[in-house]
Structure formats: structure tokens, C-alpha cells
């Protein structure tokens, strides 16, 4: 089981290894916003504070939307990522213009 800490909600949840983050958030009623769910709008942009190695690799959609410096800062799109295993800590912020 993976453990995900959702900083804005100040809660930690255990989820099955390999779970898509969007599915976990919907099931657990986490307040991470989602828009298009296809990796093109950026509504679900978040920052992995800890545990990036426990997350799936960025998808093509994420690579198209985010800048290289975004990835370096730990940014991801919540609708595109899976939690592979282990502990992950996430936060999110207001939308920004691209």
C-alpha cells in the first residue's frame, strides 16, 4: 500500500500501489481540483513535495503542458499520474497562466 499526504487537506490516505491519483482523489473526496482530466487544462497542477521516485513517469500530455523547469520543481498534473508505491507528499496551488 502507498501512503499519500495531501498537504492542503492535512490528511494522509493509504491507497493501493499503482492507483491513478485522480481515482484516489475522487474516492477519498480530496479537494484537488480536476478539469479536463486529459492533461491539457492544468487545473490539477500540483507539486510533489516528497516521494517523486514513488510516482509514475510524466506522460506525454504532461511533457506537452509543463515546462522543464516545472518538472525540476516537482510539478505534475494530478490527472496524469499514478502512485507506484511508498510515501508521497503533495500540495497544489492556484492556477497560473501558461
Image: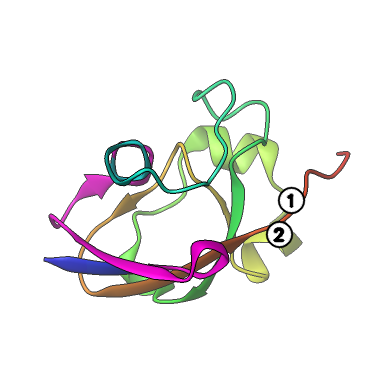
Residue at image coords 51%, 46%: 31
Look at the image and tell me in which quarter the C terminus lies.
top right
Q: Which residues are magenta?
A: 5-23
Q: Are marks 2 and 1 in contact (CB under 8 Å)?
A: yes
Dot 1, how many residues are within 10 Å of its Cα: few (below 14), some (14-19), or many (20+)? few
Q: Is residue 53 left or right of residue 19?
A: right
The numbered disc on residue 45 is none
53, above or below 70, in the image = below
Distance between the Cα atoms at labels 2 and 1? 5 Å
Residue at image coords 34%, 54%: 56
Is residue 12 in the magenta section?
A: yes
90, above or below 45, in the image = below
Residue at image coords 38%, 38%: 22
Depth check: 90 or 60 in front? 90
Percent x, y for residue 43?
66, 35
Percent x, y for residue 76?
56, 53
Dot 2, how many residues are within 10 Å of its Cα: few (below 14), some (14-19), or many (20+)? few
The residue where tag 2 is placed is 70
86, above or below 55, in the image = below
Residue at image coords 57%, 64%: 8
> Can you name the residue that lies furthest to the right here?
97
Which quadrant of the structure image shows residue 74? bottom right
The residue where tag 1 is placed is 67
Amino acid at each position: 500500500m502507498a501512503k499519500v499526504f495531501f498537504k492542503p487537506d492535512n490528511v494522509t490516505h493509504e491507497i493501493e500501489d499503482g492507483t491513478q491519483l485522480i481515482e484516489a482523489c475522487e474516492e477519498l473526496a480530496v479537494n484537488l481540483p480536476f478539469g479536463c482530466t486529459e492533461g491539457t487544462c492544468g487545473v490539477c497542477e500540483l507539486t510533489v513535495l516528497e516521494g517523486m521516485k514513488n510516482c509514475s513517469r510524466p506522460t506525454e500530455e504532461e511533457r506537452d503542458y509543463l515546462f522543464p523547469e516545472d518538472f525540476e520543481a516537482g510539478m505534475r498534473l494530478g490527472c496524469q499520474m499514478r502512485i507506484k508505491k511508498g510515501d508521497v507528499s503533495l500540495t497544489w496551488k492556484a492556477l497560473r497562466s501558461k
